[in-house]
Amino acid sequence: MTEKLNQILNEAKAEIAKAKSMLKLNEIRAFYTGKKSPLAEMMKNIASLTIEEKKTLGSASNKVKQEIELAISQKRNELENEEINAKLNAEAIDVTLPGYDLKNGSIHPINKVIEELEDIFIGMGYKIAEGPEVEIDVFNFEMLNVPKGHPARDMQDSFYINDNVLMRTQTSPVQVRTLLEANGKPVKIVCPGKVYRRDDDDATHSHQFMQLEGLVVDKNITMSDLKGTLSMLMKKMFGSERKIRFKPSYFPFTEPSVEVDVSCFKCGGKGCPMCKHTGWIEVLGAGMVHPNVLKGVGYDPNVWRGFAFGVGIERVTMLKYGIDDIRNFYTNDSRFLKQFEGER
Ligand code: PHE
């Protein structure tokens, strides 16, 4: 009997040692430890043995079973390690392979100009303000001295959400929001942002574009502050030789209002196709904050005064880089965008 047990053990061990996969090992385990294993078969035939013999055989066969199980579990560890190593080897990264040629992106020219403008104004002590693109009529028009039915509304037709809510047509509502929030204190902000108008898109019009609003309100603000500020802005944007000129204009929320021209940076003012032979290029609208606007937000116009201006960012960017179609900014043609790589 012991001999038979030893034989089973040896056979099992030999097979376990030969196993090359988990699958095979599982088969071996099922065969040697299951109900129909050689051991189990052997135990079926012990009825004729004495109690003593049964005991000895029983414990000997248990030992064999344990040894087989031990051998199986050792082999299982071995196979698992082999599997992990094989996987590690197969997935090893070859660090000597050349990398992918990923193209560098670049900052969009519009964002570049916004950043440049912000830097200039931060340098002059301004804070950056923001406002929502979905605006209420009261802030976009009424508190800017444009009551319902005012003819100036025609120029800024927008996309209406309902009678009182619209996509803002200008960044000027941020003037109202900022002053309400400042609650009687001086204000010095610029606000870049998207605005919307119901225009047909063409080379110079877009139903969505960007503006940068500027607003300064304090006790001794005069029009020469506005002129000095805008003159400085134009020198920084278009070169130190630039001059500006004011032309009378009309905005409902400024009085007086001006259209601002910069001397042509292409021809220096002599006249060329860029400035339509006038020597001047129109760049922005501005003026002194209208007393009605100040009153509306709780600033006494006899004490407080301010100036405001609005820059069309696409327009300035087109002038600066000689871009002839506003739609280039929005069509995401990488050949267009690529030209601004590394620009700054
Ligand atoms: N909001 C005006 C426009 O969009 C521009 C402007 C801003 C004019 C501030 C004067 C003062 O046309």
Image (spheres, rainbow, N blue to C red):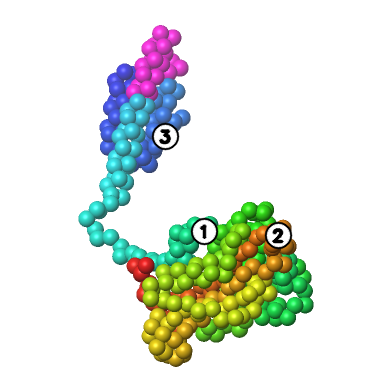
Q: Residues within 10 Å of mark 3 (few under 14, many from 20)?
A: few
Which residue was labeled with disc 3?
30
Amino acid type for the residue under numbered disc 1: Tyr
Mark 1 secondary-structure assignment: loop
Q: Residues within 10 Å of mark 2 (few under 14, many from 20)?
A: some
Residue name at image x 53 percent, y 57 percent: 127
- Residue range in magenta is 46-68
Nearest to the observer: residue 312 or residue 42? 312
Which residue was labeled with disc 1?
126
Amino acid type for the residue under numbered disc 2: Asp
Q: CA distance from mark 3 to mark 1?
A: 81 Å
Q: Nearer the viewer, mark 3 or mark 2?
A: 2
Query: Residue placed farthest to the left in the image?
Result: 96
Horizontally, residue 337 falls left or right of residue 176, namely left
Horizontally, residue 128 falls left or right of residue 42, namely right
Nearest to the observer: residue 232 or residue 157? 232
